[in-house]
């Protein structure tokens, strides 16, 4: 097959548009979507200091490479932040990849860990949760603690924006998950830019309109080193929703984009349904929160771990 755009040999069939793309046209399209999202949603102002969350996986490493290019052209500073959750046999592979890429790009790189910040690794937290008979899954602990730590690290690095590498698939899965859980407040927080509240660094998602498959191909075509392993704790409803959405896309190409677009049209109306946030400070860790105790300290406190106990 030939590339629909330039006639060179195609490497990818983009079913949702009906196009065949060669390596060059696919890479260009990924870059164009990335930079267009930044411009369209005014994610970054010239001269800003931007933090990017980098796990070492393909999405975050590609995000760092593209942001590095963008920041160079806009005289912005970029700092990479890696959270070491403490997952044996997994993070010890991805963190060196994150470091290597940051070094190659000449980017400042900070690594922060659950162990140092909360007093326990994710593995230890989950072992304790099991002992205590907690009904919460690994991703609940991991997600809450990582968000809190990333926000703190970005703020302490002097960044005014925090970029995350959520791609189209991640975003659509999160939309569907919040529908299924009927969680309006979390649903509202999704979106290209989430300008939360006092004490929170605004979060931006420049890869939100790029399918995961295209990011993976981009990393391969550009020879970008990434860690391709999967977290051993992945499972449960997240995977079921992912499989359902992939099935839908397979049978009805463009479904993922349609779900995203519909959500973006609805989002402005959700604001009136979300309870107003009254900024407070967590009495344990001092981080911003809407009640006396932040979610991270609440979860850790229930397990008698770290500062939250
Ligand atoms: Fe954390 Fe879950 Fe992601 Fe693993 S899959 S890194 S436990 S959020
Ligand atoms: Zn707290």
Image (cartoon, grey):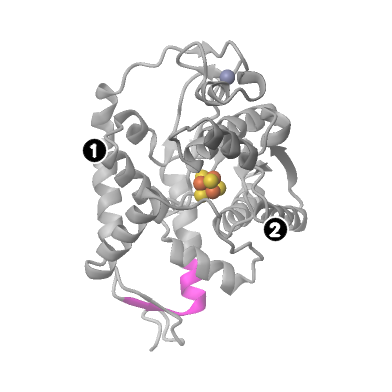
Image coordinates of residue 57 in percent, x first then y, are: 59, 57
Residue pointed to by mark 2: 93
**Residue bounds of the magenta highlight:** 19-28
* Image quarter of the N terminus: bottom left
In front here: 77 or 95? 95
Q: Is residue 158 visible?
A: no
Q: Quadrant of residue 290?
A: top left
Q: Which mark is residue 266?
A: 1
Identity of the residue drawn at 50% across and 18% down: 289
Image coordinates of residue 165 in percent, x first then y, are: 52, 49
Q: Is residue 183 visible?
A: yes
Q: Residues within 10 Å of mark 2 (few under 14, many from 20)?
A: some
On screen, residue 280 above or below 76: above
Per the picture, the main secondary structure of the magenta-coloured stretch is helix
Kindly tell me whether mark 1's CB lies below 8 Å from ligand 1.
Answer: no
In front here: 138 or 283? 138
Q: Quadrant of residue 123?
A: top right
Magenta stretch contains residue 93: no
Kindly tell me whether mark 2's CB lies below 8 Å from ligand 1.
Answer: no
Image coordinates of residue 85 in percent, x first then y, are: 64, 42
Identity of the residue drawn at 65% across and 52% down: 68
Q: Secondary structure at mark 1?
A: helix
Identity of the residue drawn at 52% across and 30% down: 132
Q: Earlier in the sequence, mark 1 or mark 2?
A: 2
* Image quarter of the C terminus: top right
Q: Secondary structure at mark 2?
A: helix
In front here: 9 or 190? 190
């Amino acid at each position: 097959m030939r590339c629909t755009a330039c006639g060179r040999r195609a490497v990818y069939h983009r079913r949702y548009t009906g196009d065949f793309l060669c390596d060059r046209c696919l890479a260009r399209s990924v870059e164009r979507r990335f930079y267009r999202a930044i411009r369209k949603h005014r994610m970054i102002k010239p001269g800003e200091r931007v933090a990017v969350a980098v796990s070492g996986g393909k999405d975050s490493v590609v995000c760092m490479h593209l942001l590095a290019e963008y920041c160079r052209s806009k005289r912005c500073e970029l700092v990479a932040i890696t959270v070491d959750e403490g997952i044996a046999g997994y993070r010890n592979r991805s963190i060196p990849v994150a470091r290597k890429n940051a070094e190659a790009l000449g980017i400042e790189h900070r690594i922060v860990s659950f162990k140092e910040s909360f007093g326990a690794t994710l593995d230890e937290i989950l072992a304790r949760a099991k002992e205590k008979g907690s009904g919460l899954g690994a991703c609940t602990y991991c997600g809450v603690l990582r968000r809190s730590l990333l926000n703190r690290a970005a703020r302490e690095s002097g960044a005014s924006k925090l970029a995350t590498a959520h791609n189209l698939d991640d975003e659509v899965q999160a939309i569907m998950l919040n529908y299924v859980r009927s969680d309006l407040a979390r649903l509202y927080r999704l979106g290209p830019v989430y300008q939360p509240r006092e004490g929170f660094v605004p979060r931006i998602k420049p890869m939100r309109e790029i399918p995961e498959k295209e990011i993976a191909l981009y990393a391969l075509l550009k020879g970008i080193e990434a860690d391709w392993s999967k977290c051993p704790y992945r499972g449960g409803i997240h995977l079921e929703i992912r499989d359902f959405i992939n099935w839908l896309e397979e049978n009805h190409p463009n479904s993922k984009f349609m779900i995203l677009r519909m959500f973006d049209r609805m989002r402005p109306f959700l604001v009136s349904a979300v309870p107003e946030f009254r900024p407070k400070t967590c009495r344990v860790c001092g981080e911003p929160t809407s009640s006396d105790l932040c979610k991270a300290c609440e979860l850790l406190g229930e397990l008698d771990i770290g500062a939250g106990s």
